[in-house]
Image: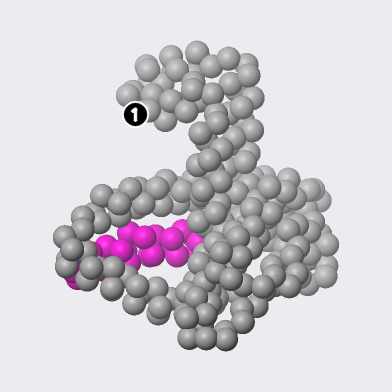
Amino acid sequence: MITCFVQLNLKLLFVLILLGFIIGKSRHSAIQNFSNKKCGYFIMDFFNLIGIPVHELGHLLFGLFFGYHIDQVCLYRTTKKAIHSGGTLGFVKMHHENHSFLQKLQGDLGQFFIGIGPLLFGSAVIYIISRFLPENIRTLPFSFQKGWAISLKALQQLRASDIIFLFVFLYIIMGISLNMELSRQDMHLACKGLILLEVIFLILSGLSVLFHWNLQYSIDILFRWNLLISSIGTISALIANLISLI
């Protein structure tokens, strides 16, 4: 029971929070560098055009799922407009009506998932889009694992249309992953529902022992996916930092 509880926290919760923190720090550094450049706002808007709406939709969809009432939504504002107005690139304002104990529990738990919504929804969007890529591109990661010779052969077999799809997909990945970071407000909101989530983890761990459920396979799958997304997000953030220094 304790082992399952620890793994749920380390492999799922901790990786998600660490991912959001690392991407957030790297992105903040890149924004500071870009803001000092003549074309910096244009470059940031280029990557934010897809990422910011996906980020805000992550908050919005989880808010709707947990019964929140949506007051106001802004999916995107240009970087220059947001900075000069002292606001954010996008926002979702919502509230939850707690007329009963169950509704209060629903609202409290929803705060956690609304807070980390951009991480969950952003990674889901990347996965869904990847399923529609041409087969030559979808098999590239497996080719890279088999050595340089096979990797080069796989790259040579790409058609012109495949290369276009590849660059568009890389642009979408960078745009989404760079904006999966958790703001201070997102972290604050997620922490409000963290205690209730820990109680659910504890109950789930107890039930797994009582009914002999094998949760290890599911935890490992989610952990590998978290690592994949965290790697993409970190690499994208580092690339953005390198570009901002040019």
Residue 102: image location, x then y, percent? 47, 81
Kind of residue sitting beneath label 1 = Gln
Is residue 145 shown left or right of residue 5? Answer: right
Q: Is residue 11 magenta?
A: yes
Is residue 61 shown left or right of residue 112? Answer: right
Q: In which quarter of the image is the N terminus?
A: bottom left
Determine which quarter of the picture holds residue 151. Answer: top left
Q: Which residue is drawn at 56% across and 46% down?
A: 125
Residue 37: image location, x then y, percent? 76, 53
Dot 1 crowding, Cα within 10 Å, few <14, some 14–19, many 20+: few
Q: How many labels does the image show?
A: 1
Is residue 87 shown left or right of residue 27? Answer: right
Q: Quadrant of the C terminus?
A: top right
Depth order, front residue of 237/63: 63
What's the coloring here? Answer: one colour
Q: Is residue 18 magenta?
A: yes
- Residue 25 visible (yes or no): no
Q: Is mark 1 on a helix, strand or loop?
A: loop
- Residue 171 visible (yes or no): yes
Residue 223: image location, x then y, percent? 34, 52
Residue 58: image location, x then y, percent? 59, 59
Image height of 29 relative to 218, above or below: below
> Magenta residues: mostly which secondary structure?
helix
Q: Residue at x 59, y 35 (%)?
A: 169
Image height of 206 relative to 77, above or below: below
Magenta span: 1-28
Find disc 1 in the rendering and name its residue. 145
Q: Residue at x 36, y 60 (%)?
A: 12
Q: Which residue is drawn at 76% across and 63% down?
A: 74
